[in-house]
Image (cartoon, coloured by chain):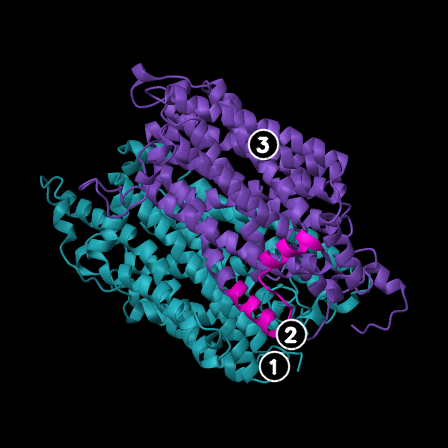
Chain colours: A purple, B cyan
Amino acid sequence: MSAAVSSIREPLITGHKTYHDITEDLIGPTEKAPNFSWVVAFLLSVTLLSFGIFCLIWTFWVGIGSWNLNRTIGWGYDITNFVWWIGIGHAGTLISAILLLFRQKWRTGVNRAAEAMTIFAVMCAGLFPATHTGRPWLDFFMFPYPNTRGPLWVNFNSPLLWDLFAISTYFTVSLLFWYTGLVPDLASVRDRAKGVRRKIYSFVSMGWTGSAKHWQRHEYLSLILAGLATPLVLSVHTIVSFDFATSVIPGWHTTIFPPYFVAGAVFSGFAMVQTLMVITRKILNLNDYITLAHIESMNKVILLTGTIVGTAYLTELFIAWYSQYTYEQYAFFNRATGPYFWSYIGMMGCNLIIPQIFWWKKMRRNIWVTFLMSIFVNIGMWFERFVIIPTTLARDYLPSSWSYYWPSWVEIGIFIGTIGLFFVLYLIFCRVAPVVAAAEIKAILKTAGDQYVGENAKKQTHSHSH
Amino acid sequence: MNQYTFDSKLKTTLLAGIGLGVLCMIATWFADPAQIAEGHTHMRFWTNFLHNTVFFTGIAFISLFVLAAFTTAYAGWYVLFKRIWEAYSFFLIPGLILLLILGVGNITHFHHLYHWADAAEVANDRVLLGKSGFLNNTWYTGGTLVVVGLWIFFAMKLRSLSLEEDRSGTADYSIHRKIRIWCATFMPIAAFSSAAMIWLWVMSVDAHWYSTMFAWYSTASWFVSATALTILMLIYLKSKGYYTQVTEEHLHDLGKFLFAFSVFWTYLWFDQYMLIWYANVGEETIYFKTRIDQFPVLFYGNLIINFVLPFLILMRNTTKRKYGTLIFTSVLLFFGHWWDFFLMIKPGTLETAEHVAHMHAESSDHGDHGDHAAHAASSFIEGFTIPGLLEIGTFIGFLCLFLFVAYSQLAKADLIPLNDPYLEESTHHEVQQDLSGAGGHH
């Protein structure tokens, strides 16, 4: 193994860690009782989740009429939130698969949490299509299978059905990928555990011994999953964009939608990773593993994808004019100046304009700015979906049926509930598994530890040859 | 050997190639097919001119863009041969001259490439009139001058900093940090400006049609072409004894890019096609309908050459590491994306030429109004529905010109940038199938 690392690169593991330190630092948190702030956060999340469950039950009891949808606007909060969550679910797989292919070593600091986040976000997203039917006990109708319903099949021509396939595939592959990565770390937890904990972890780590053969198979499996996951990152949001773009609705039917949705998804996913990582590194004291270099890299991805999304906004706007198609032109005029102008401002401001502060290195490496920005982007990307969905539907072809939509408390409650669900799952995950992939951190120690690369390494009279 | 010599034998060969191109272009001037000959538009000549100019200028542009993107992303593996991309980017200068000839041609009506450049037509066409705020000579010629001029500025700036690093690079990498700033600055400028240019140069030959995907799609096409040309260049230079440190490890990664971006190109192709087909809006579907009905060889050939074949050939790891398969696929894809641009440009311009010929016939023979169906008659028009020998000759001429510029630049500096901070990483580059994505290499 050649280990030439340019001395211009920053270390990705600081604090002069040994392999043992890494085990202690990363496995340790699963062995201690939760601290006070975790308990508070957990209770808060459970409360939000409970309210969401209440609103779901309300929806099923009272009926979908408890949502504020109307004859003109048949898609509102549910699909806005669905697309928002699915988008957030893109960062994990991007980090595990695409950054892996690009050999970005900094991914090791954040991949585990990002993958977990992906799975939780997809779960939250899946809730919306499942409940928008109003009769979730009939949701099995969505699946095409030989049935007793006579000639009644699902509509294979509909992108909404493709969505179901894409997302369930994506969820399965992400889950397998995440779990495959977890196995060696779960085995490390097992090796240090006693009693019932040991029994549980020995079951979930599937008899991992760390033998050469195990590693070899582990890597083969990961390679196959990475190969599958790479096109999946693109496919899921591509098909979500098809839900809109295959239509003839002005403002929806535009060919840039697929790559623009994918870029937007990565953008929002990274923002959510930042939100979580900034908190996690603080609470679990992981500053040596999720360093400022990691934060900076992620901020660069946010700047890049934000600018791609911004380019797409401006492209759409320009081509709407260029098309000389009156309805298309009006759709965009309406977005910017119509009754929902505030959401257009929110979208442009949070997604295109504000992230430009990341051109400055100081901003990229400032924790507070990063955290605040990640929240802005989360909001901005929510606005984007809101702009695309209700704003467009509210002004349809027939001015006599123009309408306005604002969610009812039930709809807002379900959204709040998914946020609760997301954090409940994430907080449990932080407790039961290493939140940073210990085995992968160990693998990059020799090429990214600060005793080997960067300023510290130069200062020491280390006999490491470059 | 770190100093490339552009020997006289190669010079002669390339000059001969350029000569061949010029001869073919002269012949093309007189070779308009029968159905449009009456319009005296010399459309075959001008479309070939536009096609090759855009294709090769685009490769120069995307080389610069890739250089900027890789630098910004802290990539290290490519550094050994980054001079090739620097050299490619210098074709922007002849590219600008060629584009300005087209711009001046628009103003003086040397050519009829663009339907929107005809004031009389625009006055009677509400759509074109509406677009005339963008589709006009000021934007076309002035915009090209400013935008490509700006690209050239960045190309020269990056090149001069890169050479300065060779001469006086220091351990604090101050020059490299400067390069990073210029590279990062170039990326958004390039992204925005290239889209506008592609709309003007290429998309507007179908003056009524539009697609928001178009700029992405053609940029992906350029990128695959540039990667293919880079692979071929590296293998050629290696065969001449240069770049001994460039190994199959580097070629493997370039092969991966070739594979991945062929798939990405297909992804964009599919999205654009699928969305237009599905929504079935007449103003948009006409673009593909014309191509499928009248240009079937080009249309299906495009997918076979640029997707099916590279996908199957480059799927295996070993084929990305062997000269034979790499050369074959690179040649195929380079030609394939030239073919792709051919298909972007020819149908729209043929229609314009037919329209001009029709108007011409009408003005000499009054009364025969609106007989537009008649002109779609022939299914095989050399130089339009399929590239003829003259097109191939012109292509060779432009390629030789491109290579001449590139080799001249390569000969002006060391082939390997000795003071680049990532040189060591590039020299020891290894493609490992290890999955931590890190595992101690680089």
**Residue ID at (9%, 39%):** B367
Kindly identify the amino acid type of the residue bearing the numbered disc 3: Gly
Left or right of B163: which side holds B9? left
Q: Position of residue A188 (x, y in %)?
A: 69, 60
Q: State the count of labels.
A: 3
In the rendered structure, the residue with mark 2 lies on which chain?
Answer: B
* Residue of label 3: A420
Q: Residue furthest left?
A: B367
Tell me the SS state at disc 3.
helix
Please state, as top left, top right, bottom left or bottom right, where the C terminus of chain B lies in the image.
Answer: bottom right
In the rendered structure, the residue with mark 3 lies on which chain?
Answer: A
Q: Is residue B110 above or below residue B257?
A: above
Q: Position of residue A308 (x, y in %)?
A: 53, 44
**Same chain letter for marks 1 and 2:** yes
Q: Position of residue A224 (x, y in %)?
A: 49, 64
* Residue of label 2: B415
Kindly identify the amino acid type of the residue bearing the numbered disc 2: Leu
Tell me the SS state at disc 2.
loop
Left or right of B57: which side holds B127? left
Kindly identify the amino acid type of the residue bearing the numbered disc 1: Tyr
Q: Disc 1 and disc 3: Cα gap in Å? A: 61 Å
In the rendered structure, the residue with mark 1 lies on which chain?
Answer: B
* Residue of label 1: B242
Left or right of A211: which side holds A463? right
| Res. B224 in view | yes
Start-end of magenta stretch: A194-223
Q: Disc 1 and disc 2: Cα gap in Å? A: 8 Å
**Same chain letter for marks 1 and 3:** no
Tell me the SS state at disc 1.
loop
**Residue ID at (26%, 60%):** B384
